[in-house]
Image: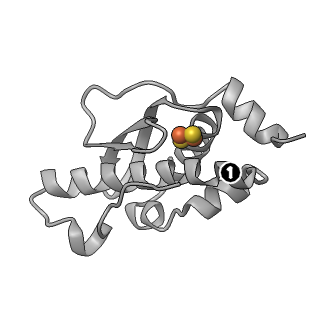
Amino acid sequence: MLYSEKVLDHFSNPRNVGEIEDADGIGEIGNAKCGDIMKMYLKIDNNIITDVKFKTFGCGAAVATSSMATELIKGKSIDDALKLTNKAVVEALDGLPAVKVHCSVLAEQAVRAALSDYYTRQGIDPLPIVGEIKEPEE
Ligand code: FES
């Protein structure tokens, strides 16, 4: 089997799909090579991510990794969410085929982009905290 059961589960039944109208931070990241796009919405209260939703126009691995990423950061502090790596998302999904690992970078970057947007809205320079957000590559 190319994909783990968890990947198939999160692909066919993705968690936290949708958008948050009054989101505190929104991040959108695209992969220039495959053209897939991921949008992440965060609701933040007292440094805690109280709600998160996503929309992904992309491949199955992108959908599954964004779904898992939302589960991993929901209810967590901003600091914890900033520590989320694409590797952690892949591990939580019991792995991805090597050619699909780049798709998981989209999830990590979308979370960072949404947090960066949150800091910008708070009047805080996001760069020292969130770091530079690079477009994922193959
Ligand atoms: Fe584009 Fe997976 S092929 S994110």
Whether residue 45 is visible to the viewer of this picture, yes or no, is no
Task: Specify whether 121 is left or right of 10.
Answer: left
> x, y (%) of residue 31?
43, 45
The residue carrying mark 1 is 99
Q: How many marks?
A: 1
Q: Position of residue 72 (x, y in %)?
A: 58, 51
> Which residue sits at x=57%, y=59%?
86
| Residue at (34, 29) in percent of width and height | 20
Residue at position x 53%, y 54% in the image: 138
Q: Secondary structure at mark 1?
A: helix
Tell me if 5 is positioned left or right of 106 in this view: right
- Above or below, 44 against 54 in this view is below
Dividing the image into 4 quarters, which one contains the N terminus?
top right
User: Splitting the image into 4 quarters, where does residue 19 fall?
Assistant: top left
Q: Amino acid at mark 1?
A: Val
Q: Residue 88 lies in what quarter of the image?
A: bottom right
- Confirm whether residue 21 shows in the render: yes
* Residue at the extreme right of the image, as rendered: 1
Q: Is residue 121 left or right of residue 94?
A: left
x and y, in percent, of residue 80 in the image = 47, 65
